[in-house]
Amino acid sequence: MSVDVQERPGAASPKRKRPVWKRPLAVARKWWGQLTSMRTALILLFALAVGAIPGSILPQRTVNVENVNKYFAENPGLAKFLDHLWMFDVYAAPWFAAVYGLLFISLIGCLVPRLREHFDALRRRPPDAPARLDLMPENASWADDAAEGADVVDRLRTLLRSRRYRTVVREHADGTVTLSAEKGYLRETGNLVFHFALVGLLIGVAFGALFGWHGNRVLGEGPDNAFCNNLQQYDDYGLGPNVSPAELPKFCIELASFKADYLDNGQPIQYSAELLYGEGGGMPDETFHLEVNEPLRLDGNNVYLLGHGYVPIIEFTDQYGNVQTSNTPFLAMNPSMLSEGVAIFPDANITPDGVRDKTKQVAFEGMFMPTAPEEPPYTSSLFPEPNNPAVMLFPYVGDTGLDRGKPGSVYALDRQQVASGALQAEGEGFLLRMGESKAVAGGTVTFKELQQYAVLQTRSDPGEGIVLWSSVALLAGLLPSLLVKRRRVWFRVKGNDVTAGGLPRTENQTFAAEFGELVAKAKES
Amino acid sequence: MPDVDATLANTADKLFVATIVFYAVAMLGYALEYAFGRKAAAVAGARSKVLAGAGGPDHAETSDVDDGEDGHVDERAERLGITMNQANRAGVVALWLTWIGAALHLSCLVLRAWSVGRVPWGNMYEFIIAVCLVGVGTWLVVVATGLAARRLGLFTTLVAILLLGTATRLYTEAAPLVPALNSYWIAIHVTAAVLASGIFMVGFVPAALQIIRRRYDQVEGSGRKPRFPITLGERLPAVENLERLVFKLHVFAFPLWTFGVIAGAVWAERAWGRYWGWDPKEIWSFIAWVVYAAYLHARATGPGGRKLAPWIVVLGWVTMIINLFGVNLVVSGLHSYAGV
Ligand code: HEM
């Protein structure tokens, strides 16, 4: 069944003379015909497949911004050029949208007329037998001397109905009776459902993008770290254009404890986080056992466990005896949980009378190893569990840049401050095992204790339901669209003479056998 | 913590090797039949023609499978001292070897599953083994129902051996699942992906053969001398028969793949917090889906589209391979698990 438009009678022919005012209309009609042809759909499908490829090769901002930044640092010129082509936001690129936009316009343009036609076909009765049934791809004729014409027709009708053919009997003036039967309407129905489901899928995706939001949070253990659902509390977040920060649902979450189980070879087998949560602004006092495949569902907002790592608690006692604590998570870099992070003490060395000397702030850049080697080099972790936890610390003194109010990563030193010399390295790096202390930068640094963190994501996607149900419809439509075969059968009875014809209306290799069997049944009954 | 039964896992490894050996010997048998057994194969075809009268509708096509019989004696075979009858017997043996190989193949997966107490497709090595099993199993069904000639097993076993051979390079110790995979969704999503991939794999073979056969017909028709691999076309079934087989297989595989992708999205929502995030694996699954959808459409766009269709199937299989190897080994994404 080709839907090529050039063959449609309605398509404009440029040779014919038409009034000038009609010409643009004709051109538009012609283009519309081209756009909604199946060949165009085929080309657009290919364009969509090819267009999706760069997103799997180049880093994407929506997936991993850091990788994009790294790419920019490594290939500045090329990256800039690629960025002009939206190569780091392929799936939000206007050219990508143009391809699927055209595809969907083409799809709808071709579906609407098909829907109308199919609707008509469903109500129309199967057409009368053609004059020459012997010209049909399948045909047979025989003499049935057992009964009168009308009986034969009744029997045949029962036979066909039992096979769920739709049947019509027509009596003609010359005494012939014809029986028309058709089945397989479900094919087109399924096909239309499938294609409309594609449109539904797109609508669901768009709805989710407009009204959804998500936020990621690296959350340490304990009530001190508990957070509530507002944007300041997230490490990064995304808001749909139709969501305002004030509308976010109110809930607060605390990580009571985190646990990871490993095999002896270091392969993780189970992560679980014990959460406390409170909805509607209440205190977090309900408990939930969160696992990777078991999100916490809070009334359309879901909380997922995406990752985990360690928080070495590092204490610094400055020259005046003031003790400060850093509990910044160290971000895991590999499966053995070698982690990178910082401990920054912007309030170090404030004099007892409260005078702040920016040049005397203290910071450490560090590497955490849950199971540190016994001997140097201390550059790897032997196991992901904290069997022998240690931090390698590199001290810095100077202006950490933290009180400049400039937003920056809390997981790394401000590189600009280091580059400008405002923050300077203070001697060699050193290893601290848990509980150990060392005199450095005019004070003492101690690796006090170890906590864990979980990476949580909270997300709301109101389009999900539409997408899910569209997918179900898509699959439900696809099966009959591929498996059901449309076919017509006719019988003409005149006295005792029966002629039969069969026409497969879609590709159907088993039709001959089916027809033969039908005829055999018709003869014997 | 689930333990790994080392004895079972070891036996599974041995079975894996045995499977490859059986398929390889079978392939030789098919090769003999393919090269020298034409006449005998035609006899078999004639026999099934007789059966077709009694059998169901599917058998009606069997007779077409071994078409184009011209009855000339193959001198090459005589030179080698192989009679057509012998070659034909080689094919029978090859089919038996394939069945045995498939049984070993199945036991390999079952033992592996048993040794770790989980579904046997938790890493790439296991995934490939499972896909090949589905592929070979599908092929055996295709041959048993008379949809394709036995000797074409040459190409199917070749593809299976190549894929299993690559799996040896990705050997992974039997181990429990990483947390992200530890969900009943693995049984749903990955099973669908394995089934679809296996059938796509078998569908790729007649599509490639269809291209060769069409080319062969063209070259022959123009009176030129075909060269390898086009010469293979001489003993291939007619283009229409291959085309029908390709379509049948894809009619099965495409909905399975669709279901697999949807199930993957449902699982992703649970595990990663979003149903679709353009992760490399998701991207290539999408591309493969679009390409196979294009195949179904191409068939409905007239003769031009029909000519294009087998090429699209080949392209589809290429996207599946890229999705399997390229995405797991080259690009890093959420589907790159520990131990591949
Ligand atoms: C994402 C895009 C699309 C997908 C995945 C898709 C998928 C499918 C599938 C699986 C079939 C069944 C194939 C068969 O019956 O042999 C089909 C049939 C069909 N599609 Fe699409 N389609 C898409 C877009 C379009 C567009 C844009 C059009 C029209 C311009 C279109 C027109 C048709 C027609 C007319 C059929 C019936 C073909 C027949 O039964 O012979 N499709 N489509």
Image: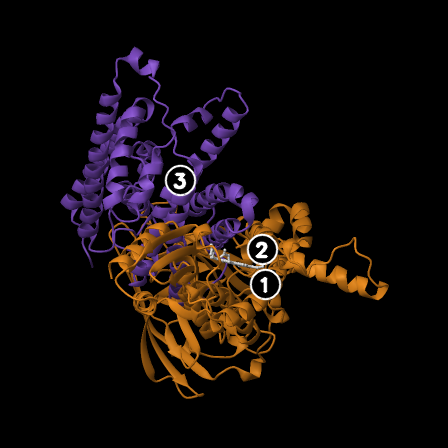
Residue A294 position, x and y percent, is 33, 70
Q: Residue at x 57, y 43 (%)?
A: B304
Looking at the rendered structure, whether the residues under marks 1 and 3 are on a common chain is answered as no
Which one is earlier in the sequence, the residue at label 2 or at label 1?
Answer: 2
Identify the hue of chain B: purple
* Depth order, front residue of B136/A445: B136
Q: Nearer the viewer, mark 1 or mark 3?
A: 3
Look at label 2 and name its amino acid: Met
Estimate the x, y position of residue B90 in percent, counting from the top left. 23, 26
Q: What residue did someone put label 2 on?
A: A38
Tag 1: amino acid: Cys
Q: Amino acid at mark 3?
A: Asn
Which residue is tagged 1? A110
Residue A438 image offset from top left, x and y in percent: 41, 59
What colour-coding does the image apply? by chain
Quadrant where the C terminus of chain A sits is bottom left
Beta carbon at label 2 within 8 Å of ligand 1? yes
Q: Are marks 2 and 1 in contact (CB under 8 Å)?
A: yes
Q: Residues within 10 Å of mark 1 (few under 14, many from 20)?
A: many
Residue at the extreme left:
B7
Please, which residue is most extreme toward the right here?
A20
Rendering coords of residue B131 (x, y %): 32, 46
Residue displayed at 48% across by 41% down: B310
Kind of element beneath mark 1: helix
Q: CA distance from mark 2 to mark 1?
A: 8 Å
Query: How would you rate the neighbour count of disc 3 (Cα within 10 Å): few for under 14, some for 14-19, many for 20 or more?
Result: many
User: Which residue position holds label 3?
Assistant: B241
Q: Is residue B233 above or below residue B163?
A: above
B166 lies left or right of B99? right
Colour for chain A in the figure = orange
Between A135 and A255, the one nearer to me in the picture: A135
Residue A241 position by quadrant? bottom right
